[in-house]
Image (cartoon, rainbow, N blue to C red):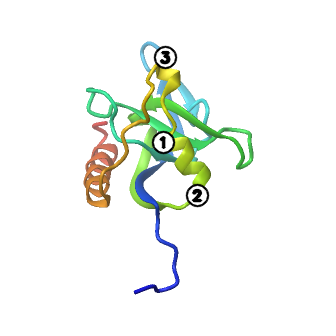
Amino acid sequence: MNDGQARPAAFCIVANVRDETARGCSGTEIHRGAGHFPPGAKVWVLPPQWGDGGDQVIVVGYHRGTRGRGLARIVIPRRHLTRFRVQGLYSPALISALTRPLAELGWDSPPRQWETRQQAEQIAAIWQHRATAGKQ
């Protein structure tokens, strides 16, 4: 049955960059946003790619100062993110940025994606609980 609405190609966790992030050796340097992304920026978050439990995550978002152009893919601490939730992926440019091989990390294969919407929703709920409890 076709209800006339486009179906997402996949599902992904999305989050927003915290207004203030602590950086530096002792975490005493307070910055607005997270380097490449301004405060409140929406980023799409890939599942953990290595064995740190998702403390460092690969995100894709519109780079600071590009006014909605120029997707950047970087690794950032998950503690710099908040408001974790799941959304469908429709944009071919975004899907390409999320699935292209991780050459910057020396990997020839594409990064792991969320296997199901349910998996992404479960992890988003855990991460959001930790973000609000201050236990990143």
Please name the residue shown 74% across and 47% down the image.
Answer: 67
Q: Nearer the viewer, residue 104 or 62?
A: 104
Q: Residues within 10 Å of mark 2 (few under 14, many from 20)?
A: few
Residue 101 at x, y percent in the picture:
49, 32
Residue bearing the label numbered 2:
91
Local secondary structure at mark 2: loop
Query: Residue beneath label 3, please?
Result: 24
- The disc, 1 or 2, on the residue closer to the chain's N-terminal end is 2
State the CA–CA distance, disc 3 to disc 2. Answer: 35 Å
Find disc 1 in the rendering and name its residue: 99
- Give the quarter of the figure containing the N terminus: bottom left
Chain-order first, disc 3 or disc 1: 3
**Amino acid type assigned to the residue bearing label 2 in the image:** Ser
Mark nearest the camera among 3 and 1 is 1
| Residue 18 visible from this viewpoint | no
What's the residue type where badge 1 is placed? Thr
